[in-house]
Image (tube, grey):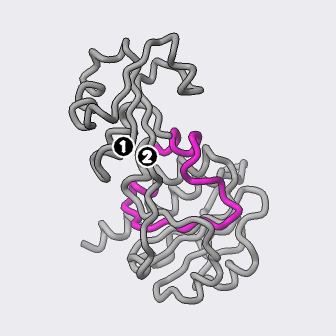
Amino acid sequence: MLEGEHVIAAYCERYGAPETLIVVESALDRDGIRKLLETVPAARCLVVTESAWPEFAQFPWGLGAMAVVTAPRPEYRESAGFCLLLDGIQDPGNVGSILRTAAAAGVEQVFLSSQCAFAWSPKVLRAGQGAHFHLQIFEDIDLVEWAHGYRGTLVAAVAAEGEPLFGVDLMPPVAIAIGNEGAGLSDALRSAATRSVTIPMPGAFESLNAAAATAVCLFECVRQRISAK
């Protein structure tokens, strides 16, 4: 279930019309809603009143639209030049924020372990703001097995005792592995990594959440790519 015109528009741009588009009547004068209605065949559209909206959705009618789609399931052939591994990140908001950051940084493929939050849940989709449709997302992946077959540099982000992030070569092909805030990366995945890095934190409060740590690591990859041009 996609919520809001922005996310639905991102899906349509990448994959075409959704199976069903539901629009609240009071939002028909919005430019974004009108564009969606022009994109989706009339037979797949349903316009409902504000009072009827709760029968279809659990979120406020002010978002204007919702859509039913089939979650994209890309076929895995080989690893891309810029990958992200998520190990046991269970908070939907964090997963969504991480996917949004990954799309902005130019990550091509994201691999989620079976302990991660479902990538297509409403909370993850809401936090992702359409990022899902700019990434290849693979779920329920045995990350250790994947790591053993990876031919690039697999970099494990760890809270302490890794090499300082900003001194490590992160040029592609590279994959960044991020663990959850409590346990971090599994020992097996950390052992499978080519290198381990730690974000230098000179402040008195030595803590970043998983989404913030991911952003720092991914955009250090971006910085190095730009500097190399």
List x then y, in percent, for residue 126: 51, 38
Residue at the spot 42% in from the left edge and 82% down from the top edge: 78
Q: Which residue lies at the image location 37% right of the left edge and 39% below the top edge?
A: 8
Q: Do the residues labelled 2 and 1 touch (CB within 8 Å)?
A: yes
Image quarter (top left, top right, bottom left or bottom right) of the C terminus: bottom left
Which residue is painted at 31% across and 52% down in the image?
15
Residue that numbered label 2 is attached to: 69
Residue 20: which quarter of the image?
top left
Q: What is the distance, in whole Å, between disc 2 and disc 1 at their CAs?
A: 5 Å
Q: Where is residue 66 in the image (x, y as percent from the top left)?
A: 44, 32
Q: Which mark is residue 202?
A: none
Q: Does the magenta stretch include residue 114?
A: yes
Say left or right for 19 vs 154: left
Of helix, strand and loop, which one carries label 1?
loop
Position in image of residue 164 (x %, y %): 59, 71
**Residue with the most extreme front position:** 43
Residue kind at label 2, given as amino acid type:
Val
Tag 2 secondary structure: loop
In the depicted structure, whether residue 62 falls above or below residue 150: above
Residue interval drawn in magenta: 102-128
Indicate the amino acid at tag 1. Pro
Return the mark for residue 18: 1
